[in-house]
Amino acid sequence: MVLNATEALEYQLPAGLFGRKRMLRLLPEYLEFEDNDLQPGQFSRLSKADIVDIRQEMTWIVWYRFSVGCEFKIDIQTKSKQVLEIRFRSYFSQNNASIRAFIKITDTLWEYYMQGKVDAYLHQLRQNQEVELLDVKMTQHKVAIFTDEPPVPWQELQVKQYPNFYVLYQQGQPDKHRQVYYFAWKSELLLTLIESMQEIGEDGPLAA
């Protein structure tokens, strides 16, 4: 298995076929990543309080029309707009294990550092406050997909997901939609908040 995780959530991430592995440590209050190629053992540390957003992406490495490997990207943005870039690759028989590890890493990143932000947005909606992400304005009962059009009830908001992006549109009007790429900042926050609201129901935030 190319990525060996311990119970302490430590991962050795391979840079490629011949590059050395780098350590990623995930803890509930902070993370550390060995991001210096030239000086092994030096870590960048980010505290949970300093993390504002995370985005991730997996793409296939293609040689002569054949998929031979995977490239994984994780970007972590801080309050000061700095970005910690986590990159690793796998090839051939390593791919399945690497994909599983990537999923575990991104799920853990979300659980430790991002789910609380969604909960905070839901709390704002419970307090009848407006939440805005990527120019999408949300209230307890309505959501405005476009800035120049009136909001629509939550039950009329439709979400359709594709491999690299998702679209938002009003029920019955799929041709008029907003397209959001997964690798865009705040896209996962927006999607998760929308899914949470749709799962709770229109009156859920106040009842929760």
Image (cartoon, grey):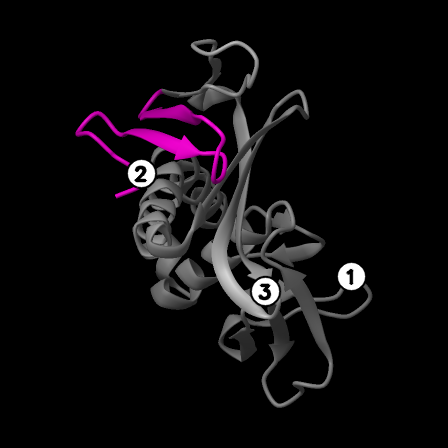
Residue 201 seen in the current view: no
Tag 3–tag 2 contact (CB < 8 Å): no
- Please rate how many residues cluster around mark 3, counting C-alpha atoms within 10 Å: few if below 14, some from 14 to 19, many from 20: few
Q: Which residue is drawn at 68% across and 26% down?
A: 81
Screen quadrant of the N terminus: top left
Residue farthest along the bottom direction in this orientation: 172
Task: Describe the element under mark 2 as helix, strand or loop.
Answer: loop
x and y percent of residue 182 in the render? 58, 57
x and y percent of residue 73 in the render? 54, 43
Q: Which dot marks residue 147?
A: 1
Locate residue 2: give its quadrant: top left
Q: Mark 3 points at which residue?
A: 164
Instruction: Please name the amino acid that badge 1 sits on.
Output: Thr
Task: Describe the element under mark 3 as helix, strand or loop.
Answer: loop
Q: What stretch is highlighted in magenta?
A: 1-29
Q: Name the residue under label 2.
A: 3
**Front-most of residues 45 and 154:** 45
Q: Which dot marks residue 205?
A: none
Viewed as shown, does residue 161 lie left or right of 79?
left
**Front-most of residues 80 and 59:** 59
Mark 3 / mark 2, whichever is N-terminal: 2
Instruction: Please name the amino acid that badge 3 sits on.
Output: Asn
Q: Mark 3 or mark 2: which is in front?
A: 2
x and y percent of residue 86 in the render? 52, 33
| Residues at marks 1 and 2, CA–CA distance in whole angstroms | 44 Å
Q: Mark 1 or mark 2: which is in front?
A: 2
Q: Which residue is drawn at 72% across and 54% down?
A: 135
Give the mark count. Answer: 3
